[in-house]
Amino acid sequence: MKYWFSLIIPFALAIGMTVAQAKDHESKPPTKVTFDEALPESGNLVLGIYENGNGGQYGETLDSSTDAGLSYAIKAAGFKGKKMATKVITAPKGSGYDQILLVGLGKDDNSNTSLDWQKIGGNAVQAAIKAFKEAPAMAFDLPKDVSANLAYGAKLGSYYFDKYYTDEKRLKYQPSLTVVTPDPDATSEYYQAELDPVANAIWYTRDVSNEPGNIIYPESFVEYWEDLFDDMDDIKITIFDEKDMIKKNMGAIYGVGRGSKRPPRMMIVEYRGGEKDDAPVMIVGKGITFDTGGISIKGSENMWNMKFDMSGAASTMGTLYALAGRGAKVNAIGIAAMAENMPGGNAQRPGDVVTSMSGKTIQIRSTDAEGRLVLADAVYYGDVTYNPALLVDLATLTGSAARALGKDYGALFTRHEELTADFIDMGKQTGDEVWPLPLNDNHFKAIENEVADVMNSGPGAPGASAGAAFIGAFVRESTPWVHLDIAGVGWNSTPTPMKASPGSTSFGVQLMNGYIKKHFEK
Ligand code: BES
Ligand code: MN
Ligand code: ZN
């Protein structure tokens, strides 16, 4: 009797602790952006200034209320208005403010792109938070689409993944941004319809991608997005568990998932915003919630980074969330291929042969080449079930792609070369830049195997192109298909104007949202 009790008590304690942890570390909701016509009366201010000193109507107002004190202070501070430059000055007497953060807008000649304006906004909010520990009102006398892009960049720039700091360390501010602009209603309408839904999608994509492997695993990833999609219209969600996978002969994803106590999942989100008969755009994401390498185990030094190995799946769901949030007139399908790649008594081994849903057999040469395995079943299922007009897979697939293109470009592979230029172009517009690497017959040859139809790795098949060929072997040749290897760009540790927080970049959401908007929406 006594022993029975001593067994039950620690169990109850453990449950209590889990609940407490979940409660203490709540995620911050996305920064709220509002637009206002009037300058605030006091406090600190952020003010946009062109290279020629033009600060628009807000600059003029302040200059006249301070007896030209503002222009004098700008000159005295040596502030030239260069794009991305920022400078804090003591507010001139009579302005009513304490301090003013000057934000350089570059040349006053309409040469800034939307992306430039977004970066100016992100850079400004980061400088404001650094200087004032808050994001005070930001005054920019700019046209509505320009102000909206600036606000979008500022919202993304205010993202910080700080939920696991204890209270004292956690950044104290919850930025809510006010942008002062001449036409707040029209600006807000455009911003709320087109840009804020994308910014929210990016926010949630970063949040889930940054979570460690003890918090996000296949089932919790699915729940996270199910909760978010709950308020959205025209969404249908289907989940396959491991039993469904066995029934559907998805031996490739099942094989990766079997080493973990946390079972694999496939999450299919259908968004129907287009005409009934329009063929959908499809995105398929690699969702390895933690990649130890499995039995072909990785070295321990940088293994912790493999919590980001579900970035492709997160960006896939994020893109669908952005489309639904905008009410985009398009049909789109997102598939997240989720598994945890662990060693263990039930894990698959090098040399094992598995049968994929396509019927093709695969010899496992390295259990660490697991991304292409989960994708094999996911792209095949998606391709034959939905006949997509375009199929894009997003995957942190190979160290080789990361070494080739670094942190600057996602690697693009396709058999449909006419798509390459459009993707490069949209990358430049959105900041999610891509660059092509080869995919040719020799790469398909390299995955041939003497035992099974294909192998997932091996001496003749190293590198990013062989990984691409492996995935391509499970997509029909007639389906327009693009593979994006985002191993180098899925996360980074240095701040950028639109991402102060180290960690997930949400790469792919802006690219795919922009690509679909330009090429598919009605
Ligand atoms: N998730 C990794 C790829 C990766 C490595 C992403 C470094 C980001 C940074 C992937 O599953 C992997 O282990 N790939 C192997 C493939 C090899 C075994 C054929 C690689 O790239 O070494
Ligand atoms: Mn791996
Ligand atoms: Zn991996």
Image (spheres, rainbow, N blue to C red):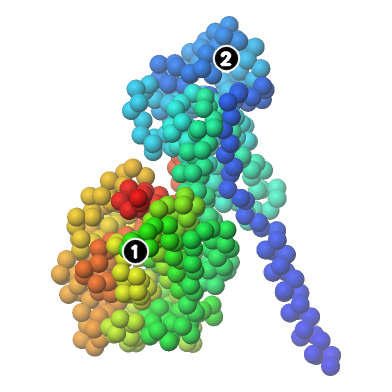
* Vertical side of 314 occupied by 138: above or below: above
Label 1 sits on residue? 277
State which quadrant residue 394 falls in. Answer: bottom left
Q: Amino acid at mark 1?
A: Asp
State whether residue 5 is above or below residue 121: below
- Residue 460 in percent (x, y) is at 21, 74
Q: State the residue at coordinates (64%, 24%).
A: 40
Q: Crowding at label 2, few (<14), some or many (≥20) Cα neighbours within 10 Å?
A: many
The percent coordinates of residue 480 (x first, y second) are 25, 63
Q: Judging from the image, what secondary structure is the residue with disc 2 in?
A: helix
**How far apart in space, not on screen, are marks 2 and 1 (Cα)?**
57 Å
Q: Nearer the viewer, residue 148 or 431?
A: 148
Q: Amino acid at mark 2?
A: Leu
Residue plotted at (54% across, 80% down): 261
Residue farthest to the right? 2
The disc label shown at residue 413, or none: none
Q: Is residue 509 above or below residue 109?
A: below
The answer to which of 95 and 10 lies nearer the viewer is 95
Of callouts 2 and 1, which one flags the residue occurring earlier in the amino acid sequence? 2
Most extreme residue toward the front, as rendered?
276
